[in-house]
């Protein structure tokens, strides 16, 4: 019977490598998706700002174009008036020649000519003013067009910088994921060597699993004295890991508590949530007492809602009562 049980455990141990590779692939995919979302967010912010500036400049150009059209219409009207005045002047000069014989008629004609000259001079002055205004408007339009060109160029430069930043960020984070994966493999390999081939302590995917009976009595969150040597070995391996992982890699060891589906309702633990959380917290507190940095430890309780075995046999229930250690990014 014991040999058959060990055979089943060894058959289960063929899967960790496959699950570890699948987990690493999932981490890389999640990371790439996060980078894509971040790059899209910054690119959207940059484009939105440029579009707002472009809208304001377009409105200014439209207003200036309308003003220019109005000024051109006024200029055309004044030129028509000047042409009419020139025609009147020419007609008055002809009338003057015809009336030169009379002194009184010549005086009246001279007065008319003088008035026509004054009107012509005032019209010429207004045309000159309009020409200067038109020249100023053209300079403003040229300046606005130059600003638009510069804005478009800055937008292109910003997009190029964002793309370059995204590529560098992808590369840097991919390197960090690879490094963390390597340290996790080394950490779990070291734990296998330290703890040996025990059926109640095993590797499942990217997690190191203790059966709850190894660490706790039934319905309790107090660590059993017999469990402390195994936790001491794990703490030693974790202290060595802290020394080896570079400080710029954000990592944690998450301690997950799990129970079976049988309900519990005591004054201390009203449900399996409280029991699983308290057990995970007890393991974290013990590791902290052994010198592990609190910033590298997290306690989480999952109750009965993350079973390894969907069965209801005593063996299935025993497999689901567990404490898991998972090395992951923070």
Image (spheres, helix red, strand yellow):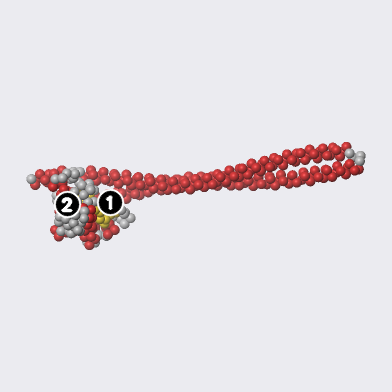
* Outermost residue, left side: 1
Is 62 displayed left or right of 32 in the figure?
right
Tell me if label 2 and label 1 are in contact, CB under 8 Å: no
Across and down, in percent, residue 5 comes to: 11, 45
Horizontal side of 280 relative to 84 (left or right) equals left
Q: Is residue 313 toward the left or the right of residue 158 in the image?
A: left
Which mark is first along the chain, 1 or 2?
2
Tell me what residue is drawn at x 77 percent, y 44 percent: 120
Q: Residues within 10 Å of mark 1 (few under 14, many from 20)?
A: some
Residue 285 occupies which quadrant of the picture?
bottom left
Q: Quadrant of residue 106?
A: top right
Nearer to us in this view, 282 or 167: 282
Total number of numbered discs in the rendering: 2
Residue 73: x %, y % from top left = 67, 41
Which element is circle 2 on? strand
Res 234 visible:
no
Q: Which residue is mark 1?
A: 328
Q: Is residue 125 visible?
A: yes
For the residue pair 61 and 330, the one nearer the viewer reads as 61
At 85% across and 38% down in the image, what residue appears? 95
Q: Residue at x 83, y 43 (%)?
A: 112
**Screen quadrant of the N terminus:** top left
Label 1: element kind: strand
Crowd class of label 2 (few under 14; some 14 to 19; many from 20; radius 10 Å): some
The nearer-to-camera label among 2 and 1 is: 2
Report x, y in % for residue 59. Answer: 56, 45
Q: Mark 2 = which residue?
A: 211
183 to the left or right of 101:
left
Rounded to the nearest angstrom, the CA distance separating label 2 from label 1 is 21 Å
- Find residue 84 and report its horizontal and vertical position in percent: 76, 39
Q: Nearer the viewer, residue 32 or 317?
A: 317
- The disc placed on residue 251 is none
């Amino acid at each position: 019977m014991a040999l058959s049980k060990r055979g089943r455990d060894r058959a289960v141990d063929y899967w960790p490598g496959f699950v570890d590779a699948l987990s690493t692939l999932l981490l890389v995919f999640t990371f790439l998706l996060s980078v894509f979302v971040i790059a899209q967010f910054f690119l959207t912010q940059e484009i939105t700002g440029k579009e707002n500036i472009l809208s304001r400049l377009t409105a200014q150009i439209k207003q200036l174009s309308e003003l220019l059209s109005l000024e051109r219409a006024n200029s055309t009207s004044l030129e028509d008036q000047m042409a009419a005045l020139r025609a009147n002047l020419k007609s008055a000069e002809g009338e003057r020649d015809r009336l030169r014989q009379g002194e009184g008629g010549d005086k009246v004609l001279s007065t008319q000519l003088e008035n026509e000259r004054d009107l012509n001079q005032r019209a010429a002055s207004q045309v000159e003013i309009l020409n200067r205004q038109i020249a100023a408007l053209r300079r403003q339009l040229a300046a606005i067009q130059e600003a638009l060109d510069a804005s478009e160029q800055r937008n292109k430069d910003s997009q190029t910088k964002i793309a370059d930043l995204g590529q560098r960020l992808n590369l840097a984070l991919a390197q960090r994921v690879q490094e963390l994966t390597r340290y996790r493999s080394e950490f779990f390999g070291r734990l296998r060597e330290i703890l040996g081939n025990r059926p109640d302590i095993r590797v499942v995917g990217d997690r190191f699993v203790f059966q709850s009976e190894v660490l706790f009595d039934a319905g309790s969150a107090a660590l059993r004295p017999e469990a402390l040597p195994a936790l001491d070995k794990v703490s030693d391996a974790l202290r060595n890991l802290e020394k080896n992982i570079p400080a710029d890699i954000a990592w944690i060891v998450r301690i997950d508590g799990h129970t079976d589906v049988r309900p519990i309702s005591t004054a201390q633990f009203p449900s399996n949530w409280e029991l699983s959380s308290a057990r995970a917290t007890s393991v974290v507190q013990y590791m902290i007492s052994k010198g592990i940095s609190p910033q590298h430890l997290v306690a989480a309780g999952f109750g009965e809602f993350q079973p390894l075995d969907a069965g209801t046999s005593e063996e299935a229930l025993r497999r689901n009562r567990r404490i898991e250690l998972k090395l992951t990014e923070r």
